[in-house]
Amino acid sequence: MDHQGEIEFIIATGIDVTEQRRVWNKLEQQYRQTKLLTETTRRIRMSIDLEEILQTTVTEIQHLLVCDRVLIMEIKPNQNTLPISEALIGDLPSMLGYEFADPLLMGEYLTRYHQGQVLAIDNLDTAAIDPDIKQLLKQFQVQAKLVVPILSQGKLQGLLVAHQCHHPRQWQESEIQLLHQLADQIGVALTQAQLLNYAEELAEERTKELTATNELLKLEIAERTQTEQDLRENEQKLAGILDNADEAIISIDERQRIQLFNQGAEKIFGYQAQEILDQPLDILLPQVFRQIHRHHIQEFGQLPAKSRKMAERNSNVYGRHKDGHEFPAEASVAKLSTKAGMLFTVMLKDISERQQTQEKLQTSKTLLAKAEKIAKIGSWEYDHETNQKSWSEELFNILEFDQDLATLPGCPEVLDRVHPEDLLLVKKTLRAGHQQGKSWELNYRLQFPDGKIKYIESRGEASVSSEGKVLRVLETIMDVSDRIQSKKSLRRSEEQLKLITDALPVLIAYIDHQQRYLYNNRTYESWYGRPRSSLQGKTIRELVGESNYRQMQPYIETVLGGKAVTFESQPVTENGNSYWMNATYIPDFSSSGVVKGFFSMTEDITERKAVEQMKSEFISVASHEMRTPLTAIHGVIKLLAAGRLGELSESGTKMAEMALRNGDRLVRLVNDILDLERMESGRDEINYQQCDSGELIRQTIDSLSSMAEAQGIRLATVSESIELLADRDRIVQTLSNLISNAIKFSPANSTIWISSQLEQQNVLFAVKDSGRGIPTEQLETIFERFQQVDASDSRQKGGTGLGLAICRHIVEQHQGKIWAESIHGQGSTFFFTLPQV
């Protein structure tokens, strides 16, 4: 700074901290790695939740290494790998739960992993591995891959895998070393989990042994107590009233009054001992059993036997609870002669739950038998320790053995019914199951003496001891004859359908949801000049070209959205020629309602279009050419009928009037033909404007009121006033046609109802009459050209047969629908809808 305190210049120094920053980043990375390793080690030591440990570990690795996917893979016995934990970024497909046959995780690579070697691929495109393996990995967007074995005590427990999916990556030695250390800790966790599982299994086995020993001790104590009861009266009495028994133990004297009432009795009957002692036993019995029980005790007291063993039970016993409900019981009674007299001890157990369980078990067995019968599934079980076998009821039916046999059929008898061509395979399979404990799934045939064949699907499973000894074998046998026959019938039907589709001169195909051809009929070969096999797998865009595909695309999207669609298009060939095609697409749904693809039927309608064009042009020219002379003729006849050209005779007047009526009809016919031709040719444009549905109906009624009055018919409306966009004149024309038809075919003194109402986003119009009605089979055809319910209608009613066809064209031009409902002889209702907007 100068003497005035102002800055003259600045001295600055710069230090290159690149190396310092690199060292700092490396130290930070090492710190994070050390922290992750320490945290993982801590979790393994503190937690027994293996799934949580593994998932947290892969998540932390993915965050630390900033890679796209981290997996822990379990190695299956078939060398396939199954991801059991996964961490990935959101836009990648998950591999969790899918079993893979990844060549990099099996075979010679697996041997390397057993030796503790690591597989590091920095760039999949340049890696020296099989192209097929590259293609497989690219399906999961893998660009770089790191595989570290998980070893524990020298054994390969699994694999720790890291993927880089969006770009190649050079794996650093520190990263590989970190994954090695983490893999060691994961191996510890897996070993720890295995030891825990082993300890739990050992504890469970020890618990079972202790329980069995305890049961033996209980039995020994009971037997010793019974012996002591025989020696000493007091010890017998104490043994008979053990208060800790679950059963009710009740002692009564000769008067059948209660002397002892243990805790088990309190729990079963709901009484406390102090309130029940010295009370008659009848209080614990339902009314119907009291007299029977007294007689039983008296009779038992007179028998020479001192006691009745517990095995001599009578299950037809019921007790009565304090709250009044009755329950089934299992009871036994013993007697003892004392100085005070005879003492009877009753041991009773509430078997309500047992009975309910037995009933449920019986119901389940019944349902199982019914289910087996419906599904045609039989089963048998063989116990190798007891040499006992059991058959289900349906197995008798499948094998066609008599269920009333004294003994179950033996193995030779069953094998006699196996088809000779399948016998060796069946014997070999059964031998492996019974001798080696191997499970099986097998299909074979049965052949019966009458030559009948049954197709069988068999599944078997053996129960094997820890020493490898086969204890029991269970097999299910399903009669799949109907299924096999159905498959054969389906195959025949498919072959017949293929023959039919190949014979049709239309293009028939099946296309999947990715717009690829999976099936093409023979017509495709002649149409495209190449074999069908070369078309399958191609997309629609590839086959028809970009410009033609754009015409079809909206309809393809519609059918893949789940709606059938029919349309016409005018594709262009490679040489520039155009042709007309009519196509129908029908969606194909899976069982879950998802569109799997669609069926396509396409027909060349070029010739039909040309004929229609010629017909349309002919009708247009003919109608226009007829209109001019017809107008003159109609005018002259009108003057004649009115007497303007001189007075006519009576017969001449009648002829002139008849000619006038037919002239009017001919004028209407020509006008209708021209209207229809103009609509179908597309020259008639819709003039949309804001309309009121009620006003449209009232305007039409006003114009037809004189016609209705002449027929003695009342026109009534209950329409709402609904705003909509439509061509006013065309909708009035539609209503006029429908109402005038109703007037023509309604009896005198009847009412025609015209209405409109809002249904969702559409306006629904209805014209209801009480005329003769329309047969069901004609409800669709009446909307076609020159169609009438009765051919005489055109003569009697003066119709042209084109009015309803015109109505349909007008409504469909408005993107609406028109239809009729009728009960023959009870009138008809014509409906049409128009979009409100």
Image: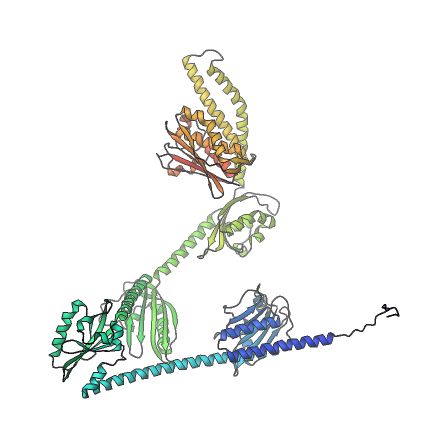
Specify whether 753 is left or right of 277.
right
Q: Nearer the viewer, residue 563 or 275?
A: 275
- The percent position of residue 748, horizontal first and vertical second, equals 37, 27
Residue at image coords 40%, 81%: 203
Q: Position of residue 74 (x, y in %)?
A: 50, 74
Figure colour scheme: rainbow
- Compared to residue 23, the image places residue 327 above or below, namely above
Residue 170's x, y, as percent? Answer: 65, 72
Q: Quadrant of residue 706?
A: top left
User: Which is nearer the eye, 626 or 797?
Assistant: 797
What's the residue at 46%, 50% (across, down)? 501
The reply to whether residue 117 is visible in this rendering is no
The front one of 99 and 478 is 99
Q: Inspect this view and state whether residue 121 appears.
A: yes
Left or right position of 716 against 332: right
Give the quadrant of residue 39: bottom right
